[in-house]
Image: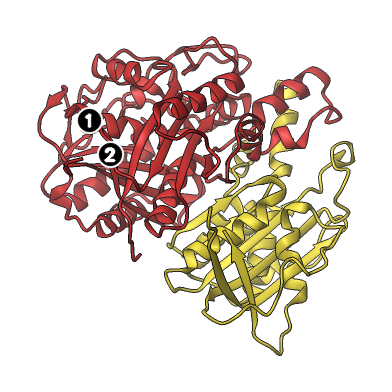
Amino acid sequence: MMSYSINLEIIESAYVYAPQEIEELNTKILVPKMLTRRRLTRAAKIAIYLADKVLFKKGRIVYGSSFGELLSTSQILHSIGEQETISPTHFQNSVYNTAVSYLSMLHDNQEEIMTISSGDNTSLSVLKVGAVKALEGDTILLLVTETLNIDNIEKVNKCAAHLECGVALKVRLTNEKATLDLNALKSEDKMPNSINKMFTIAKNCDRDKTNIIEVLL
Amino acid sequence: MKTKNRVYITATTSSSCAGDNSQVLFENILSSSTGIAQDADYFFNANPAIGKLTSCETFHDELILQCKKNLENSQLKNYKETLLIIGSSVGGMSTTEDIYMHTKDYENIDPHKHHIQAISNSLMVEFDFYDTLSFSTACTSSANAIGYAYEVLSKGLYKNVLVVGADSLSRTTVGGFLTLGVLSSEPCRPFDKKRDGMNVSEAIACLLIETDIQEGCIEVCGVGYSSDAYHMTHPQPEGKGAIDAMKSALEEANLRPQDIDYINAHGTGTQANDSAEGTAIETLFSDKPYVSSTKSITGHTLGAAGALEAIISCMVIQEQTIPCCTFLEEAENKKINLTSKNYIQDLKYVMSNSFAFGGNNCSLIFGKVNDVL
């Protein structure tokens, strides 16, 4: 079967990561309202930080996370295990599209916002979906986060050394040739597999040049 | 969105609390036979009305079975050239819960059986697909999956797509909606003045979507997306996001509001959803298409709802029969044309709405195929 490829120009890129918890996400400045700020999940704070770094407020977003809101999920599991009532905040924050929903509310962004969760291939799927969406000609934010920093995570996490991480790529369609070869780029072995593809791209973007990737569907 | 190819749903299979195949599902909808019943298995000290699969198979085995049946119903020999798109809000959460309840420990939890991709992982063991990806936008997950299938096929990027909407019941969703105070202890009464909440349910719904026209197929005419940017769990009260999604779907389908014959509403039976959705429909559709929600029969199947209700919409067109809004006694919004009975009539276009936590909205439009084969 013939496969299609779509080239994307990376207009801006940003990434952030830490072995445990990312210390400075500038949340107090970026989210001045305390009531809103208090409800944000770690992934939402990372998403807001990265969107600010790539200067993106309104427009279509393709977001991805393999494990979603793991802290809310673990708190719900604990409640279920102890036969306690589930916290409404934990439940509303447990859906996979939580982080980008808070981001949309912050900037009153009423555009299409998709959330992908494709396991280890999550960031590759975000690139593919983003490339298809970019065929319309608009600028799109591709965003991935993982927030695995919960108690006892070592019992299930045998791979990722960085428990909090995120990547943002602001992209648009281009007919120019690719300048970054996805297959030739060396991936980072400490990152969760789910974000590795986009992290490797962001890390290899040259700020002084035009960065273009070819996304193979 | 510049489209090229026309896109058709050529094979559908489903399993829900209203039957383990789509024909029985539609018969139950037309006869108002609900699959919803009270159940105390999913959360301590609570007895909400929920919807369990009628099939005796495990959820995993039923998932495989429905995809096998879909392949048998299709003209494909295999899924080797098929893009698999999953729409799910909880993925393998119930598996994780079972392990945790037993051990109170994460030790035996397999991450690959926990996340959303767990559904796809199960299917990839049984079938050989060209590629796979999963959407998880809470209750719009599989509607968005159908929307994406429509986009890639209309642009000629893939040969065909199998969309699978799948969500199993879990303590998380039953307990979560309980704590939000939106679960009813009876089958829900969407759009009724005395509605008192929704019913969480489970379902598997599979749609094979292609660009080749086939006997009995239904056309996917358009998709519209929007975000409320308003609240995590409450829709914008005037239904602004819902209006944007419906408008966008009409524009994509090159249709006017008066072209829509019937709207299969999101209609969960909660105060907030039905009020906002009713206002949105009232605002956009001056010509009053028929409106009903089928969730009083199927319950709210969360991430599977978009796919299950897409199948129901296809059957409405195939059978030329609009279902009644079951258990509706007195409509809260009298300005929309809620159905009090089933209507047999010529109809061409059906809209299906899906709305989710985070203000994620998706409207799909399906159409009767008039082309002579």
Packing grade of label 2 (10 A; few <14, some 14-19, many >=20) is many
Marking on residue B218? 2
Pick whichever, B258 or A75, lies toward us. B258
User: Which residue is identified by label 1?
Assistant: B318
Q: x, y (%) of residue A30?
A: 64, 70
Q: CA distance from mark 2 to mark 1?
A: 8 Å
Up/down of B125 relative to B358, above or below:
above
Please check whether the numbered discs 2 and 1 fall on a single chain. yes
**Given contact means CB atoms under 8 Å apart, are the residues at marks 2 and 1 in contact?**
yes
Packing grade of label 1 (10 A; few <14, some 14-19, many >=20) is some
In the picture provided, is A34 more to the left or to the right than B364?
A: right
- Of mark 2 and mark 1, the one earlier in the sequence is 2
Residue A32 visible in rendering: no
Q: Chain of mark 1?
A: B
In the picture provided, is B122 more to the left or to the right than B370?
A: right
Chain A: drawing colour: yellow
Residue B12 sits in quarter: top left
Pick whichever, B361 or A107, lies toward us. B361
Residue B17 visible in rendering: yes
Chain B: drawing colour: red
Q: Chain of mark 2?
A: B
Element class at badge 1? helix
Q: x, y (%) of residue A111?
A: 43, 63
Q: Amino acid at mark 1?
A: Gln
